[in-house]
């Protein structure tokens, strides 16, 4: 029950922030273009809190249904109920030049992209804690097994994209599958050697793009963290013996060690003993003798060497404020292009529409990220913000992209579309959105049932 409540609260807060960012883009650019704003609302329905601004008496509202928001300008098309005061002549939305209107419509999605850019900039300056992508068990007869992939190898890159974590790796794998049915994986073996395997899925591409089918369909799972000294504690036996951060332990005495769990189990059984640690550093195998300390616990004395049991590691350098700008820009562009590509491939049928997520799935992802930590929550919010920006630019009449299209047609023909044409467009847009929402809710329910 507490998890569900956390998901709901985190979802409402995250969506409210992203909606506020989007609508603020419309609002501030509208004001810059000389338009009068009547209302700025976070949420739909009846306002539950209202503040009247000093400029133009704009109503700033928080409304009862927290699943969207809007900015209402004076004289917007389809709104003829507000008489225009002579003092406001020329400040109505539809009285401003077409390029002003298009700029205001573009501002909402642009601010969504700007939000993602800002989040990635913050993350670049502190580093993103991630879990090393490790190949788990490989199923016999699977695509992965036929390609020669082996368990306990570290996934280094997918194609030309570095696999810094499973999220990046998963997106890159899907894109490679959709592109040509081939998945080139660069892996590091347990001996520290680099090699490449290419998984060929042939015509089985669409099935593998379904949620939860990617790795089971390819025939391997995500493995346990390896026995890598991510954090060697100063002054403890491992550090005194000469182990360094990043050393990959492969054997303790005569016992092979692969995962961090193996390392803990073996060391725990050796309190107050000297053990030979064999490890890889810079691709070379070395051995050091470590005096394992004994630590009293409720279950008796256990061995400890001072290697941090933190499976996470910051990949890549931590950037300064200026250098982080380039990293943030690249990340924003990459995620935007990936979103557009996946959406386009859903339209043409190359990617399963089961990937469309509704509020239940999104709330689950946001809640899980919130429980993991602020950085993870911001990261998922950046991704959702990019998705909102892309979706709002689609040429569907009820969205910003559709309104931009209307204004572009008006600029070309010298006059607005007829009321009948506009209403037909609105009806088409509503049907399209209802279909999209239906798919999203169906997918959510199917995932919940399964």
Image: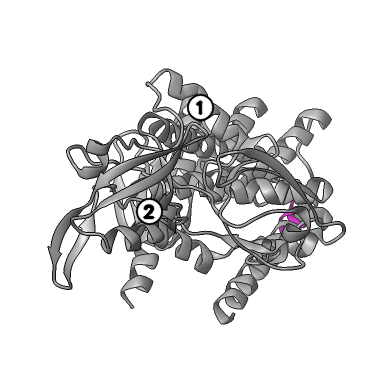
**How far apart in space, not on screen, are marks 1 and 2 (Cα)?**
43 Å
Label 1 crowd bin: few (<14), some (14–19), many (20+), radius 10 Å:
some
Q: Tell whether position 424 is magenta.
A: yes
Please tell me whether residue 227 is drawn above or below residue 53 in the rendered image: below
* Camera-nearest label, 1 or 2: 2
Tag on residue 253? 2
Please tell me whether residue 218 is drawn above or below residue 156 in the rendered image: below
Q: Position of residue 438 (x, y in %)?
A: 66, 70
* Residue 17 in view of the camera: yes
Q: Give the residues in magenta.
A: 422-426
Q: Is residue 246 left or right of residue 361?
A: left
Q: Residue at x 56, y 43 (%)?
A: 191
Residue 158, by quadrant, is top right
Residue 338, by quadrant, is top right
Label 2 crowd bin: few (<14), some (14–19), many (20+), radius 10 Å:
some
Q: Position of residue 156 (x, y in %)?
A: 59, 41
Tell me the quarter of the image containing the N terminus. Answer: bottom left
| Disc 1 element | helix
Tag on residue 327? 1
Q: Residue at x 60, y 34 (%)?
A: 106
Between 76 and 402, the one nearer to me in the picture: 402
Between 227 and 38, the one nearer to me in the picture: 227
Q: Tell whether position 79 is magenta.
A: no
């Amino acid at each position: 029950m507490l998890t569900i409540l956390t998901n709901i609260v985190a979802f409402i807060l995250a969506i409210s922030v992203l909606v506020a960012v989007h609508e603020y883009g419309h609002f501030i650019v509208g004001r810059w273009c000389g338009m009068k704003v009547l209302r700025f609302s976070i949420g739909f329905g009846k306002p539950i809190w209202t503040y009247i601004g000093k400029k133009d008496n704009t109503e700033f509202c928080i409304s009862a249904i927290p699943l969207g928001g809007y900015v209402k300008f004076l004289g917007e098309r389809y709104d003829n109920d507000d008489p225009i005061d002579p003092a406001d002549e020329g400040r109505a939305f539809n009285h401003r030049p077409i390029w002003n209107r298009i700029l205001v419509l573009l501002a909402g999605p642009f601010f969504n992209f700007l939000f993602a850019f800002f989040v990635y900039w913050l993350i670049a300056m502190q580093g993103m804690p991630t879990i090393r992508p490790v190949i788990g068990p490989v199923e016999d007869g699977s695509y992965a097994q036929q390609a020669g992939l082996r368990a306990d190898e570290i996934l280094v890159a997918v194609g030309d994209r570095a696999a810094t974590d499973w999220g990046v790796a998963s997106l890159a794998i899907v894109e490679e599958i959709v592109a040509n049915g081939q998945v080139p994986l660069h892996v590091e073996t347990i001996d520290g050697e680099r090699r490449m395997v290419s998984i060929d899925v042939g015509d089985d591409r669409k099935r593998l793009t379904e949620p939860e089918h990617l790795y089971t369909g390819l025939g391997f799972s995500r493995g346990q963290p390896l026995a890598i000294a991510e954090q060697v504690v100063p002054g403890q036996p491992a550090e005194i013996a000469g182990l360094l951060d990043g050393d990959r332990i492969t054997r303790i005495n005569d016992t092979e060690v692969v995962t961090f769990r193996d390392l803990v189990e073996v060391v725990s059984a050796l309190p107050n003993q000297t053990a030979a640690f064999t490890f890889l550093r810079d691709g070379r195998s070395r051995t050091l003798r470590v005096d394992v300390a004994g630590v009293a616990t409720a279950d008796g004395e256990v061995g400890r060497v001072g290697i941090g049991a933190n499976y996470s590691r910051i990949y890549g350098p931590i950037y300064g404020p200026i250098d982080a700008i380039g990293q943030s820009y690249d990340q924003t562009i990459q995620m935007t292009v990936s979103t557009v590509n996946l959406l386009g491939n859903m339209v043409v049928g190359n990617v399963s529409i089961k990937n469309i997520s509704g509020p239940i799935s999104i709330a689950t992802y946001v809640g899980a990220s919130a429980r993991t930590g602020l950085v993870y929550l911001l990261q998922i919010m950046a991704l959702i913000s990019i998705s909102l920006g892309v979706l709002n630019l689609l040429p569907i009449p009820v969205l910003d992209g559709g309104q931009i299209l209307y204004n572009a047609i008006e600029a070309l023909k010298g006059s607005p579309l007829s009321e009948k044409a506009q209403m037909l467009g609105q009806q088409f847009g509503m049907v399209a959105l209802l279909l999209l929402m239906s798919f999203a809710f169906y997918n959510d329910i199917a995932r919940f049932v399964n």
